Image: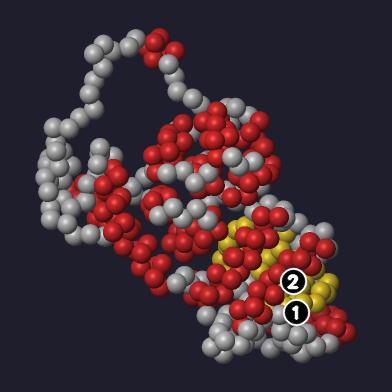
Amino acid sequence: MPFKIIRNDITKVRADVIVNTANPKPIYASGTDLAVYQAAGADDLLAERKKIGYIERGDIAVTDAYALNAKYIIHTVGPVWVDGKHREFETLESCYEKSLQKALELGCDSIAFPLISTGVYGFPKDKALQIAVSVFSRFLLENDMQIILVVFDKKSFQLSGQLVGEIDSFIDANYIRQKRKSEYRGRPFRSNIIEADSPYDSELYEECRCYSTKEETEPDLLMSVPMPEKAMSLEEELENIGMSFHDKLFELIDKSGLDNKDVWKRANLDRKHFSKIQCDENYHPKKKTVMALCIALRLDLEEAKDLLARADWAFSPSSKVDLIVQKAIIDKQYDIYQLNLVLFQYTNEILGM
């Protein structure tokens, strides 16, 4: 069971474990802590919490979930941000790691986290997000559990400014190309960005990647795909039909040297879903599933296009999801968790799950 990100109130989420950002003392004040107590039943939860007593920062304690739609609440006390030099990072990592380990010990299949310490404790949201996802990815390589990161609103979810700038520039470059393509359809035009479906495809992405402003040049309108000397009959075409999606996928897996478990984990898929793909040769996957598999197998752009085509899909130049996935492939950024952070920021969608 993989990782997903949702925008919601964590007290409304269904999971075996709800993680609460607790106060070190057996009290509740504001933010997620207050919301959890109110939703669970403040009197009953506080009475049990008082039996536990003081919780050190970076540590955890477990209580019943009471009225929440869960089995347990894991209370963890995050660090107060000072300047990043007072063990804030290590303490926050400990909150996530100990919570996951306890959920594993309790035999839980799912756990929902808020972004710990990013409220009144002031931990920078972009840094907290990276720590959370880093811990999740390490854990999921070795264990099967559904991890749900719950963010309350858009302000709660922030990527680094540098990454946002790069993605914005790439999307803008492609949207400009699409706008000009639609305006000048059917007649030649001068452009510093070459069409994605032209023979210059790789040059387009190199230009979009570098965001260059090269001197405009006239594309070679005479270049075309050569026709065969003799057209094949339909029967001959069908006899030479290409490899199916299923066969191509498992050929690529064999070539990669990965085992199936590595692939489904790197693609943020669960075992049952991957087993269905493996066992049913006629299974038609969703587009985002194929893109997730392209990331898992570290395909280059042409290989990714080929695998998508075998499942009757193609990258759309007008889809932000598709553009962001293409940028990740071009940049050889094959971490599905990091990619999903970017996708969620821009589209509220993720790959795999």
Q: For residue 99, what is the image quadrant?
A: bottom right
Count the marks: how many?
Answer: 2
From the viewer's side, name the closer residue of 134 and 285: 134
Is disc 1 surrounded by few (<14), some (14 to 19) or many (20+) residues within 10 Å? Answer: some
Q: Residue visible at 83% across and 87% down?
A: 53
Instruction: Give the structural element (helix, strand or loop) at label 1.
Output: loop
Locate residue 265, reporting x and y percent. 63, 49
**Mark with earlier residue (1, 2):** 1
Q: Amino acid at mark 2?
A: Lys
Q: Judging from the image, what secondary structure is the residue with disc 2 in?
A: helix
* Residue 140 shown left or right of residue 169 in the figure: right
Residue 206 location, x and y as percent? 29, 52
User: Left or right: where does residue 232 sit relative to residue 116?
Assistant: left
Visible residue check, residue 11: no
* Depth order, front residue of 272/226: 226
Residue 93 at x, y percent in the picture: 65, 74
Q: CA distance from mark 1 to mark 2?
A: 7 Å
| C-beta proximity under 8 Å, tags 1 and 2 | yes
| Residue located farthest toward the right when viewing the structure as drawn | 51
Number of residues whose C-alpha sits closer than 10 Å to that of mark 2, classed few (under 14), some (14–19) or many (20 or more):
some
**Residue at the (54%, 35%) spot, across then down:** 255
Going 53% across and 44% down the picture, which residue do you hit?
297
Residue 267, position as x, y percentages in the image: 57, 48
The answer to whether residue 159 is above or below residue 352 is below
Name which residue lies at 81% across and 65% down: 71
> Which three-letter amino acid code belongs to the residue tagged 1?
Asp
Q: Is residue 7 visible?
A: yes
The answer to which image quadrant residue 21 occupies is: bottom right
Please identify the quarter of the rendering in which residue 120 is found: bottom right
- Residue 98 is marked as 2
Point out which mark residue 59 bears.
Answer: 1
